[in-house]
Structures are given as structure tokens and as C-alpha cells.
Image (cartoon, rainbow, N blue to C red):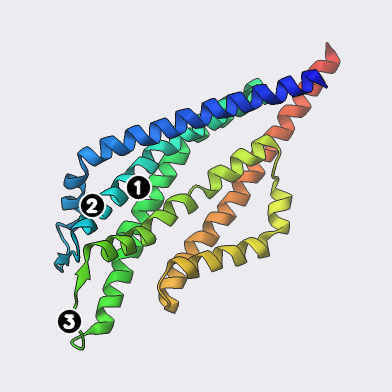
Amino acid sequence: MENRDMDLIGHLEELRKRLIITVGAFILLFILSLVYVRNIYNWLVQDLPVKLAILGPSDILWVYLMLASVIAIAGTIPIAAHQIWLFVRPALKEHERRVTLAYIPALFILFISGVCFGYFVIFPFVFKFLLSLSEDMFMTFFTTEKYFRFMIRMTLPFGFLFELPVVIMFLTSLGVLNPFRLQQIRKYAYFGLVLTAVLITPPDFLSDVLVIIPLLFLYECSVLLSKIVYQRKHETNINDSTFAVKN
């Protein structure tokens, strides 16, 4: 009982250490992002066809903090993934450690790819579509806060959603998930993805479809990749068992 308590305390101390490193990295990246946030802001609005306005002196500060937070989150993802890997590493076999370590850069790359997909594909389409609805009936007046809040809502979720394949591969490597389970819950996963797409897009059918199709494709890619990881893991376990028997 005492040894079990000591193990629990050791795990909690290790978890605390990983959390402190992750939070510290986020704070450092956040401060660094604030230094260059004006340049980032100017780059994002350089081709904007409308003029942004602020309703109060705190609005622009809020936008700067929001942009710096997004950049800090993007930079913290590989660090957080590495800390998670270090936390679960003692429970992994040698070949599992090498395989799961490769997921860390993939997480960052997929997050950036998702954000770029949202910013360069989804956001311009939805933004132009909503502007076209006003035609000459309304005077367009955009506040800086509402514009960037809308832009982040159209881009940031895709960064996390695009990480779905790597997360599922990682959980398959750990034995938490398997492709058969993913196939069984496919209809529930589809419902969740459709609901997510409806929530993060404006209430029009075309925008929903434009988002739903990539999400469903990502899920099917995740199932396929999970099968590959599961088969390789199964073959490795068989080889290890055969080697143990021979020796």
C-alpha cells in the first residue's frame, strides 16, 4: 500500500513538472508574440477591403492579446506534446517510444495546416458571402474586435480538428483506441463532426458543407491510419513473443 502511494505521488510530481514546463513555455511565447504583434496585425489587415474601427481604447489591446494567445498556443503545441510523451514514456516499449516521438512534429504541422486551411479557404469564402448578402442595403461597419473574433472562430478550430489523425494514431499506439472501435462509433463521430461544423460556421448550407466534407475525410483518414498502426503494433507483438519463446 505504501509503495502504491509512493508511485502515485511520484506520478503526480511528474505531471506537475510537465504542466509547469508547458505553462511556462506558453507564457514565454505569449510575451514574445506581444513584441511582434503589431507587425502580425498589420500583415493580417493589409489586404482587407474594409476599414476597421474601434469603439474604445481597450479594443485594440484585446485584439493584440487575442492574436498573441493564438500564436502562443500554436508554438506551445509541440512542447505540450513532447511533455505528454515524456510523461507516458516509461510505460512504452522502446519501439513505441520511437514511433510516438514522430507524432510531435506532425501535430504542429497539422495544426498549422488546419489554420491555413481555415484562413485561406474557409474564411475568405464565408466573409465574401456574408458581405454579398448586404449588397447596397446596409453600410458595412466592422469593429476590430468583432472582425478578429470572427476570423479566429473561422480558423483556429480547424487547427485542432486537423490534428485528429495524429491523435487517433497516438491513442492507437497506446492501445486506448483501435480501428474496429472507430468503425463501430462512426455514426456517432459523424454526428459530432457535423454538429461541430454547424457550430463554427455561419448559418448557411454551403458553408456547412464546405466544412463538413473535410472533417469527414479527416475521420476516414484517421480510421485508415489507425488500421496501419494497429497492424504494425500487432505484428511487432507477435515478433516479440516469438523471439521470447525461442530464447
**Residue beneath label 2, please?**
61
**Residue beneath label 1, please?**
70
The answer to whether residue 190 is left or right of residue 158 is: right
At a point 17% along the width and 46% down the height, the residue shown is 38
Q: Between marks 1 and 2, how big is the CA–CA gap? A: 14 Å
**Residue beneath label 3, please?**
139
Q: Is residue 43 above or below residue 52?
A: above
Task: Please state the horizontal and vertical placement of residue 202, each as a whole percent of the image.
Answer: 40, 73
Quadrant of res 151: bottom left
Binning the other alpha carbons within 10 Å of mark 2 as few (below 14), some (14 to 19) or many (20 upward) gives: few
The answer to whether residue 230 is left or right of residue 14 is: right
Q: Which kind of residue does numbered mark 1 sit on?
A: Val
Q: Are marks 3 and 1 in contact (CB under 8 Å)?
A: no
At a point 49% along the width and 66% down the height, the residue shown is 197
Q: Between marks 3 and 1, how big is the CA–CA gap? A: 30 Å
Ranked by sequence position, the earlier of labels 3 and 1 is 1
